[in-house]
Amino acid sequence: MTASVLVVTHSGRTEALHATEQTMQALRDVGLHPVREDELQPDHELAMVIVLGGDGTILRAAEMTRGRGVPLLGFNLGHMGFLAESEREHIDAAVRRVATGDYDVEERRTIDVRILRPGAAPEEGWALNEATVEKSEPARMLEVVTEVDGRPLSSFGCDGVVIATATGSTAHAFSAGGPVVWPDVDATLLVPISAHALFARPLVVGPSSVVAVEVIARSGTPGVLTCDGRRLSDLPLGTRVEVRRGAEPVRLARLSHGPFTDRLVSRFALPVSGWRGAEDRRRAAEGSPR
């Protein structure tokens, strides 16, 4: 039976649509069966998901295929593309490697989210990047109390709180002033957004910790929860949001073994002038001319 490969595309871009046709043909050329998003059925057995777009499209593909355990291979057609593995011009070569199984799979930790509203049944959610508790009214401040491992940490007024994975540390958490965390670090970030408090610094907690944010009942502003910028839930006053290590990781296909440092430098266009590589340092130590 011919292996099926799902192709997920950022449909709002002409470049992505052209890249989709190129990818579909490349898959057929190597004997793989391409499946478009609108053709995906629950009983489809997928060998791979190829994603054409930015990180937002990859997050959508992860949501679409959750529970299937299939790896995602992203091609960056967006701006940052931290989750993407390759660029548009490498599609044909990458598809040939997919056909021969010449790739590795990296598991990225997720977070499980539990919403406890007053007088209501719990609601479950998840995220690869982050779960963000934000104010629902732009002109008002959100009053919250934060908790780690069942103990109160701090209460304050803010625009919101980001609870992120290491993968999500370069997304919303970074924009809110959080640290960049290497993807292989098993940790959870808690990053307040524009908090009115003396102690409202970003925190990095261990993998077994449970982080909670409660919308203080006495405040007048309800909140809203956003998971990966895609799935929204209302948070009435008195609602509690609990975040813990996810039970199901997202699997990313990798074609290269370059360090995350190189990806960080490339995506943020960081200046590295003045850096000397190992060979330059050896020559300097030996007093040899360059």
Image: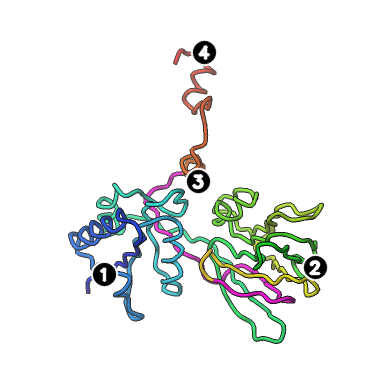
For the residues marked 3 and 2, what is the alpha-carbon distance in whole angstroms? 34 Å
For the residue carrying disc 1, how many other residues have a C-alpha within 10 Å: few (<14), some (14-19), or many (20+)? some
Q: Residue furthest left?
A: 29
Answer whether residue 256 is magenta in the image.
yes
Quarter of the image with the C terminus in it: top left
Question: Which residue is label 1 attached to?
Answer: 3
User: Residue 60: x and y, percent?
Assistant: 44, 66
Front-most of residues 50 and 116: 116
- What's the amino acid at mark 1? Ala
- Label 3–label 2 contact, CB within 8 A: no
- Specify which label sits upstream in the sequence, 2 or 4: 2
Which one is closest to the eye, mark 4 or mark 3?
3
Front-most of residues 141 and 118: 141
- Specify which label sits upstream in the sequence, 4 or 3: 3
Q: Is residue 286 above or below residue 222?
A: above
- Specify which label sits upstream in the sequence, 1 or 3: 1
Question: Which residue is label 3 attached to?
Answer: 260
Answer whether residue 158 is magenta in the image.
no
- Label 1–label 3 contact, CB within 8 A: no
Name the secondary structure under disc 4: loop
Quarter of the image with the N terminus in it: bottom left
- What's the amino acid at mark 3? Phe
Q: Which mark is residue 160?
A: none
Q: Is residue 23 visible?
A: yes
- What's the amino acid at mark 4? Gly
Question: Which residue is label 2 attached to?
Answer: 151
Residue at left 65%, top 86%?
Answer: 121
* Residue 213 relative to residue 58: left or right: right
Residue at left 71%, top 68%?
Answer: 213
Question: Which residue is label 4 attached to?
Answer: 287
